[in-house]
Image: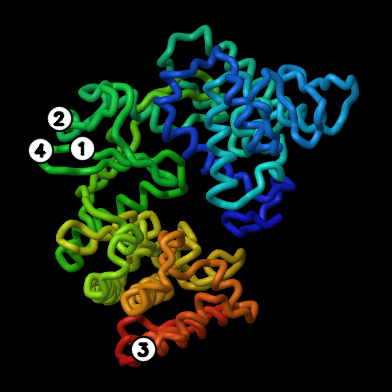
Amino acid sequence: MICQVCKKEFDEYESPICEDCLRKIWQKSNETPTNEWATKFSRQRPPSIGQQKHLANLYRGFHWDSNVNYSTHKDFPGHEIDQKSGECSCGENCDASSKFKQFLEILPNNAFRTSPIIFTLKGVRDEYKVDPSEIPIKQIKALWDPRHPPKNKTNDPEKTKSLFARLRRSKRRKWGEKASDSNQIYEEWPTPLHYTRSIAKQVNAFESKRFKNAEFEWKMKNVRLLSNSGQFTFVLPCEIEGEKKVIRLFTEKKPNITERYEQLSQFFQENSIIEKIPELVDFDFYKDELNVQTKSDSGAISRKYDLIEMDRVLGDPLDEFISKNFQNSSKLLDIADQFSEFVEKLESNKIGHGDLHPKNIIIDSDQKMKLIDYDCFYIPPFKEDESPESGQSDFQHPSRSKKGSNFPKYDETIDRFSSIVIYLSLLIISKEPKIYDEKYSENILFSEEIFDSLREGEVPNLIENIKGISDEKIKNLMKYLLEYIKSDSPQIESLSEIIKNVR
């Protein structure tokens, strides 16, 4: 199967979305509003009628009659469905009853678990255009049901049985007892809720005095932190020794991610990277800094986790900046110049960002550009490593996300394709703002779908419109871009070289 989200092959399920992508969406959905749900729902409370209706609408396309207390599907007039059993008033296992019974199989047994399922299915439908009804019931249940454990736990029935036996025994132990390494199969990675609980005990949670005295911003004191959640991170604004900072905590155990940041921090300091490239945001890596309590198969466990402290950048992501200023040619051209200078500095210092896209480019109040998110950053010590991520596909060469592809090479040239896409987009909008469609603002102009169409020999309307712009620089840049898109492993020149050639 090919995942419609990451475009990679997988074989866990006959499904339009792979296990990894669905779990990432689940984790993000489960984290962001968890504290809000906790104030409304308990684990003992059954799913509300509203939750059931919402979930059934998402998964099986039911349409409910709001004037009655039972469900009525518009395709089956006169068929009244019992919401608990799924049985139909007609007394037969009709299509309406069959569909509703399938829906009941994915319905968690409490309200607290139902909400993240709803957010997950809504996310795959709205954000990734995946039909939730095509996702197998077993795959959805595996998100929350321990009878269907994910691959990183165990799928062996005998091991699962022994796991439950240990969990039952662990309930009799005192909370906080550490798990034994001899029989440990699975250890829970902290979620934002775990981190929040720990930070609420601030003095005892942190190892360094620096963070013990930090002032965090709470939406609800000691319950809900002001935060931003990324795909793998929990980002907390705070004030440390009078300076505005953010703390990044990882919400997923990514291979070598903390080791990479430790090396990055050391490399930045030893080579004065921030002084050479002020567009980058300074950061420090702290190993084993925050003590967090989670669970393992053997009971509760306390462990220290790494964190990253970064300068806080206030401003608009590039896509929002363009949305506000797409009719202001001078501002867009200024950002385009800053951007071209920035990517030239990166490559001349033998480093690369690895995931250039509008959400990672912040324009501050002085209209200066700052770059964030270094999860995919390249430095010389990472030479010969594989890229930890394939980058946001709307700004990467189509070959980068293909299984088995070794293009582009993970080195200081990693940003060449995305830098052309971003720079050219800024020039096009500055010259012809009518081409800019605000509903595509996150992608600016181009997209993965447009790249794929061009490779298949089609010419999307956007490309036709761009060809109509009477600007030689834009025309020449487009020739380079189209040439690179159509090749599986093109020899991409640096943006600075291309700009020199097209002037």
Q: Quadrant of the C terminus?
A: bottom left
What secondary structure is found at the residue carrying circle 1? strand
- The label on residue 471 is 3
Q: Quadrant of the N terminus?
A: bottom right
Nearer the viewer's eye, disc 2 or disc 1?
1
Q: Earlier in the sequence, mark 3 or mark 2?
A: 2
What secondary structure is found at the residue carrying circle 3? loop
- The label on residue 213 is 2
Amino acid carrying mark 4 in the image: Glu
Q: Which residue is mark 4?
A: 241
Measure how far apart labels 2 and 1 are at the Cα level.
Answer: 10 Å
Residue 266: percent from left, percent from top? 24, 55
- Are discs 4 and 2 less than 8 Å apart at CB? yes
Measure how far apart labels 4 and 3 are at the Cα level.
Answer: 51 Å
Measure how far apart labels 3 and 1 are at the Cα level.
Answer: 46 Å
| Residue 406 seen in the figure | no
Residue 481: percent from left, percent from top? 46, 81
Q: Which residue is mark 1?
A: 238
Nearer the viewer's eye, disc 4 or disc 1?
1
Residue 158, image quadrant: top right
Tell me which residue sits at (87%, 29%) in the image. Answer: 94
Q: Earlier in the sequence, mark 3 or mark 1?
A: 1
Measure how far apart labels 4 and 2 are at the Cα level.
Answer: 8 Å
Q: Earlier in the sequence, mark 4 or mark 3?
A: 4
Q: Residues within 10 Å of mark 2 (few under 14, many from 20)?
A: some
Amino acid carrying mark 2 in the image: Asn
Q: Earlier in the sequence, mark 4 or mark 2?
A: 2
What secondary structure is found at the residue carrying circle 4? loop
